[in-house]
Structures are given as structure tokens and as C-alpha cells.
Amino acid sequence: MSDSVMTLMLGVSTFLGALGLIALLWGLRSGQFDDQAKFLDGARFDGEEELRDAVMMERKKEEALRKKQQEKEKREKDYRPAD
């Protein structure tokens, strides 16, 4: 590549990197990433019914995985190669 193309690519990439850094610093300084109440609100507004539903869904998921594993083991056990 020619020197002018390399210089142009280096200048553009440096400019874009600096622009990204400035945007990140602006976001940090203006509080864009501060969410202090997120976890407290999540715990505060979860009721017993939602928690029971979450536990039930987790149990169903575990049961489905266990069943799938058992079927896989059975298929592997019953496998016989063709003669």
C-alpha cells in the first residue's frame, strides 16, 4: 500500500478511537451508566406468585434436561452398527 493510504487509515482510526473514548467519558461523567435502583426494584416488586412460577419453570427445565439425557443414554445403549 502506498504511504498516503496508510497515513489516511491511521488518521481515521485514531480519530474514531478518540471519538469513542470521548463518548465513553461523557457517558460516565453524565451518569448514563448509573442504575442504583435496578436490583432493589427487582426484588421489591417480585411477589410470591412470580417466585413460585420461576421455581416451577426451573424444575420443568431440569426435568426436561434429565429426560433428554436418559433418552440419549438409552439410544447409545441400544445402538447396534449395521452388519
Image (cartoon, rainbow, N blue to C red):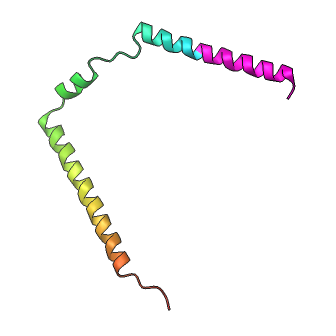
| Front residue (pair 7, 32) | 7
In the displayed orientation, state which residue is furthest to the right. Answer: 2
Given residues 34 and 15, the one toward you in this image is 15
Q: Residue furthest bottom?
A: 83
9 falls in the magenta region:
yes
Q: Is residue 72 left or right of residue 7?
A: left
- Residue placed at 68% from the left, 20% from the top? 13
Characterize the magenta stretch by its predominant secondary structure. helix
Residue 49 vertical position relative to residue 28 in the rendered view, above or below: below
Indicate the position of residue 80 as horizontal and vertical percent values: 42, 85
Residue at the location (14% across, 39% down)? Answer: 49
Please provide the residue range marked out in magenta. Answer: 1-19
In the rendered image of this protein, does residue 81 appear above or below residue 63? below
Q: Which residue is drawn at the image coordinates 21% and 43% (left, top)?
A: 54
Vertical relation: 21 (above or below) 44:
above
| Residue furthest front in the image | 3
- For the point 67% across and 14% down, which residue is it? 15
Compared to 62, does 24 lie above or below?
Answer: above
Q: Is residue 56 magenta?
A: no
Residue 16 placement, left or right of 9: left
Identify which residue, 40 or 78, lies in the foreground: 78
